[in-house]
Image (cartoon, grey):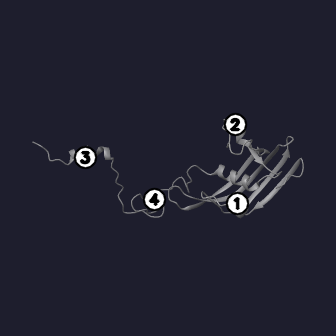
């Protein structure tokens, strides 16, 4: 969206298709409600403070079943112009990331990319290991049965290959 003045209030309801390419980690399962205030805080700098609300569909990391994750994320970002590379062939210069860099975003041509802002906020709320519930029992490692739905007949057998020589001692006939 193009910035028009020193302060602007933005309320949008975005369809999943408005966010750009689909992410392989989740599916946006409901319209994304975006509310934010954008204020000019410097000659070329803006601050965006707001909230993103929606529902994401994820696959459980244990049983692979889809489940819905409600999202209600707040953000506070400082936007500055996209830096222009001095030498396009030199590539990006290396520098240490500072704490302020985590709240800095870039705009170009006087526009904020709302789709990129929302996608970033959704990525930040994704759990490290998505689980449909803390009591999820997952899949049987032998037959693949979803153990949340039914119990399989497999007997879990796991042997440490390093202990195999000791197991052979148990099977030897006893000497008198």
In this view, 100 is above or below 12: above
Q: Earlier in the sequence, mark 1 or mark 3?
A: 1
Q: Residues within 10 Å of mark 3 (few under 14, many from 20)?
A: few
Q: Position of 94 compared to 111: left or right?
A: left
Q: Nearer the viewer, mark 2 or mark 1?
A: 1
Q: Are marks 1 and 3 in contact (CB under 8 Å)?
A: no
Q: Which residue is mark 3?
A: 167
In this view, 64 is above or below 44: below
Q: Earlier in the sequence, mark 4 or mark 1?
A: 1
Q: Residues within 10 Å of mark 1 (few under 14, many from 20)?
A: few
Q: Earlier in the sequence, mark 3 or mark 2?
A: 2
Residue at 67% across, 60% down: 21
Q: Nearer the viewer, mark 4 or mark 1?
A: 1
Q: CA distance from mark 1 to mark 3?
A: 57 Å
Q: Earlier in the sequence, mark 2 or mark 1?
A: 1
Mark sitting on residue 139: 4
Q: CA distance from mark 2 to mark 1?
A: 28 Å
Q: CA distance from mark 2 to mark 4?
A: 41 Å
Q: Nearer the viewer, mark 1 or mark 3?
A: 1
Mark sitting on residue 20: 1
Q: Position of residue 53 (x, y in %)?
A: 72, 56
Q: Secondary structure at mark 4?
A: loop
Q: Are marks 2 and 4 in contact (CB under 8 Å)?
A: no
Q: Secondary structure at mark 1?
A: loop
Q: Secondary structure at mark 3?
A: helix
Q: Are marks 4 and 1 in contact (CB under 8 Å)?
A: no
Mark sitting on residue 99: 2
């Amino acid at each position: 969206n193009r910035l028009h003045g020193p302060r602007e209030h933005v309320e949008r309801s975005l369809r999943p298709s408005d966010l750009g390419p689909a992410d392989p980690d989740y599916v946006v399962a409901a319209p994304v409600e975006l509310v934010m205030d954008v204020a000019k805080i410097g000659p070329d700098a803006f601050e965006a403070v707001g909230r993103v609300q929606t529902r994401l569909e994820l696959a459980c990391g244990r049983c692979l079943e889809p489940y819905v994750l409600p999202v209600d994320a707040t953000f506070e970002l400082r936007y500055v112009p996209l830096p222009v590379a001095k030498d396009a062939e030199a590539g990006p210069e290396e520098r240490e990331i500072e704490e302020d860099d985590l709240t800095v975003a870039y705009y170009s041509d006087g526009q904020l990319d709302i789709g990129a802002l929302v996608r970033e906020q959704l990525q930040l709320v994704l759990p490290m290991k998505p689980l449909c519930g803390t009591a999820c029992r997952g899949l049987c490692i032998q037959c693949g049965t979803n153990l949340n739905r039914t119990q399989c007949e497999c007997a879990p057998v796991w042997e440490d290959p390093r202990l195999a020589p000791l197991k052979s001692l148990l099977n030897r006939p006893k000497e008198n």
